[in-house]
Image (cartoon, rainbow, N blue to C red):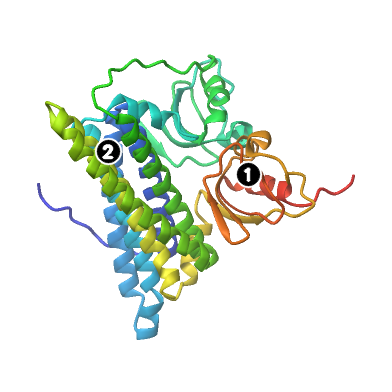
């Protein structure tokens, strides 16, 4: 295989960094989707996007080198290049997850089922002829507000549309890949297919001893790696050392979980005839840990007090997926209510990644988590939903 040949053309650094961030995060979503559903087409698209990331990485390095003449200018772009390199590492790790499918590595069905049932999940749905979605744009539908689901990719015949925007018009037969809270899946699926969503009961033989323990670890590693990325970008967006330290703590916990899983695999290998069925588990754990490592490197720009060039903040803020930080006021109508009661994800289209409460953090709050006055919410999702969440956190004005 011959090495890829790049050809330089002038590009805007901010736009390049935004595209690298969005593409790497999309790759993670698609890679897990490919693994969960054993979809080789999606897995191959992840590798195609990995090639795109290589090109973006080349262009941002070339543009940075050509735009500096003095030492202080070069120092100012150090942080930009570090964040870009980390986005590339996240993309590489996503590519490794996709290869689990393409190389036919063993992943136990219990693990796939557990990942499908995660609170923030990915769903596929094909638009029917009678669907209310057919012929309408994503902007018209406002699916993030109506269902809490975010369309991350569309397969149209043999082509793919990545990160579709509000102007994207949906067609009959489009296969939608959407991410969001599990509560929004039935409504989203019914809107697209005109059929009631019925979770499939999957029967599978339990081949491995104590597999539930390994499944719990891997599900936690997947959730924590994605949380780490979101918090890392939050740390640089808000130049917040507290959030950066939390990313560092998550990275250390991920290391411990990886070692625990490796020990489980070594113990389990004694009792199985074909150890190849364990390869996929180890590969997935290593890739998830690599994503967390890259997230820590992003947050490290804040911890080491590397000068954050304004380009970084602009790139993160201009991303398709916004990251927002909001404080819940004492008089807010959501104080004292649980996430389950509020259905924040389906009402706003934003996923609350973490809550800062006094001097401690609550990661990935559950449905029974009660919101308290003064809570600082760190959320990600659609730009439209940001306004809805702001209104919920503020005092309700008397009409």
Quarter of the figure with residue 138 = top right
Alpha-carbon distance for marks 1 and 2?
A: 31 Å
Quarter of the figure with residue 334 = top right
In the rendered image, which residue does mark 1 sit on?
A: 385
Give the camera-side residue of 322 and 397: 397
Give the camera-side residue of 380 and 342: 342
Check the image and report above or below for 313 versus 380: below
SS category of the residue bearing label 2: helix
Give the camera-side residue of 181 and 55: 181
Check the image and report above or below for 12 versus 133: below
> Which residue shows up at 61% across the image and 37% down it?
368
Quarter of the figure that contains the C terminus: top right
Q: Position of residue 318 (x, y in %)?
A: 52, 56
The 10 Å Cα crowd at callout 1, few under 14, some 14 to 19, many 20 or more, is: many
In the rendered image, which residue does mark 2 sit on?
A: 98
Whether residue 70 is visible to the viewer of this picture, yes or no, is no
Whether residue 117 is visible to the viewer of this picture, yes or no, is yes
Check the image and report above or below for 118 versus 323: above
Q: Position of residue 355 (x, y in %)?
A: 58, 52
Q: Position of residue 229 (x, y in %)?
A: 42, 53
SS category of the residue bearing label 1: helix
> Which residue shows up at 24% across the image and 59% down it?
7
Residue extending furthest toward the right: 399
């Amino acid at each position: 295989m011959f090495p890829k040949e790049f050809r330089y053309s002038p590009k805007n650094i901010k736009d390049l960094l935004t595209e690298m961030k969005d593409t790497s995060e999309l790759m993670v979503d698609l890679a897990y989707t490919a693994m969960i559903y054993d979809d080789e087409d999606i897995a191959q698209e992840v590798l195609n996007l990995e090639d795109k990331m290589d090109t973006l990485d080349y262009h941002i390095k070339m543009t940075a080198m050509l735009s500096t003449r003095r030492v202080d200018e070069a120092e100012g772009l150090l942080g930009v290049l570090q964040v870009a390199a980390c986005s590339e590492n996240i993309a590489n790790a996503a590519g490794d997850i996709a290869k689990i499918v393409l190389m036919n590595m063993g992943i136990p069905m219990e693990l796939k089922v557990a990942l499908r049932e995660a609170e923030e999940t990915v769903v596929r749905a094909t638009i029917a002829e009678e669907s209310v979605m057919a012929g309408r744009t994503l902007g018209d539908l406002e699916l993030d507000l109506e269902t809490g689901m975010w369309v991350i990719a569309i397969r149209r015949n043999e082509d793919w549309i990545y990160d579709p925007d509000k102007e994207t018009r949906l067609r009959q037969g489009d296969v939608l890949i959407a991410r969001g809270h599990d509560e929004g899946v039935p409504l989203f699926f019914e809107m697209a297919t005109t059929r009631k969503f019925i979770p499939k009961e999957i029967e599978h033989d339990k081949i491995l001893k104590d597999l539930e323990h390994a499944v719990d670890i891997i599900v936690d590693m997947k959730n924590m790696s994605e949380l780490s990325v979101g918090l890392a970008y939050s740390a640089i967006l808000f130049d917040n050392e507290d959030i950066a330290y939390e990313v560092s703590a998550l990275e250390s916990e991920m290391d411990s979980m990886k070692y625990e899983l490796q020990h489980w695999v070594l113990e389990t290998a004694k009792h199985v005839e074909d150890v190849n069925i364990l390869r996929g588990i180890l590969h997935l754990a290593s890739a998830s840990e690599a994503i967390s490592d890259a997230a820590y490197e992003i947050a490290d720009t804040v911890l080491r007090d590397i000068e954050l060039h304004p380009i970084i903040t602009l790139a993160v803020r201009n991303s398709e997926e916004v990251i927002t930080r909001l404080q819940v006021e004492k008089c807010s109508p959501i104080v004292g209510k649980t996430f389950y009661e509020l259905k924040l994800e389906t009402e706003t289209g934003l996923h609350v990644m973490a809550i800062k409460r006094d001097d401690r953090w609550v990661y990935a709050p559950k449905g029974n988590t009660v919101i308290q006055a003064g809570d600082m919410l760190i959320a990600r999702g659609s730009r439209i939903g940001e306004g809805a969440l702001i209104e919920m956190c503020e005092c309700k004005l008397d009409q």
